[in-house]
Amino acid sequence: MEQELTQFLKAYEAANNSHVWENVAPFIAPQASYWFTDGSHFGIDEIRRAIEATFANIQDETYEIRDVRWPLVKDDAAVCTYTFHWRGIIDGQAKSGSGRGTNALQRNNGAWQIVHEHLSN
């Protein structure tokens, strides 16, 4: 099961690195909540606006998920913790950062989706 979940996270990472919302959307449950350092976002519409703003703000961004741990794995729910790392161009300047992440996942109609993501620096 952890291998399947890890593949899900790798695919989510790749979708984010495409910088195309339509690639990211299937990974997120409609009722999800996302907590970022700069604010909290509830429901797919708010999350879309936040993610698209990040795509617009950070040019040529590369996002990586590392050091994944799975403290809870069940048939239809899982929780992971990880570190994230990003680099890109903001206002013409090379920037990078990292932080900690926690995702709660739920299996919906046979497919995993994120129901909560919390990223902090």
Image (cartoon, rainbow, N blue to C red):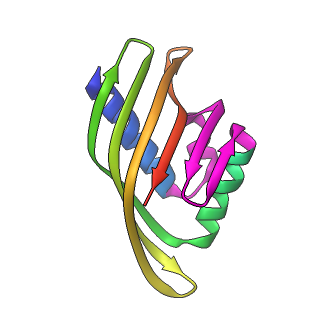
Q: Which residue lies most toward the right here?
A: 45
Asked whether 39 falls inside the magenta stretch, the response is yes
59 sits to left or right of 41: left
113 sits to left or right of 62: right
- Rendered position, 25 above or below 48: above
Total numbered badges shown on the rendered structure: 0
Residue at image position (47%, 51%) is: 119
Q: Where residue 21 appears, x then y in whole percent?
A: 63, 50
- Rendered position, 37 above or below 60: above
* Frontmost residue, 44 versus 36: 36
Residue 26 in view in this figure: yes
Residue at image position (60%, 61%) is: 38
Q: Where residue 109 appears, x then y in whole percent?
A: 56, 14
86 sits to left or right of 54: left
- Rendered position, 81 above or below 36: above
Quadrant showing the C terminus: bottom left
Q: Where residue 70 appears, x then y in whole percent?
A: 29, 30
Q: Which residue lies most toward the top here?
A: 75
Q: Quadrant of residue 64?
A: bottom left
Range covered by the magenta-colored residues: 18-45
Q: Quadrant of residue 26?
A: top right
Quadrant showing the N terminus: top left
* Frontmost residue, 70 versus 110: 70
- Rendered position, 26 above or below 13: above
Residue at image position (69%, 40%) is: 42
Residue 51 in view in this figure: no
Residue at image position (42%, 48%) is: 13
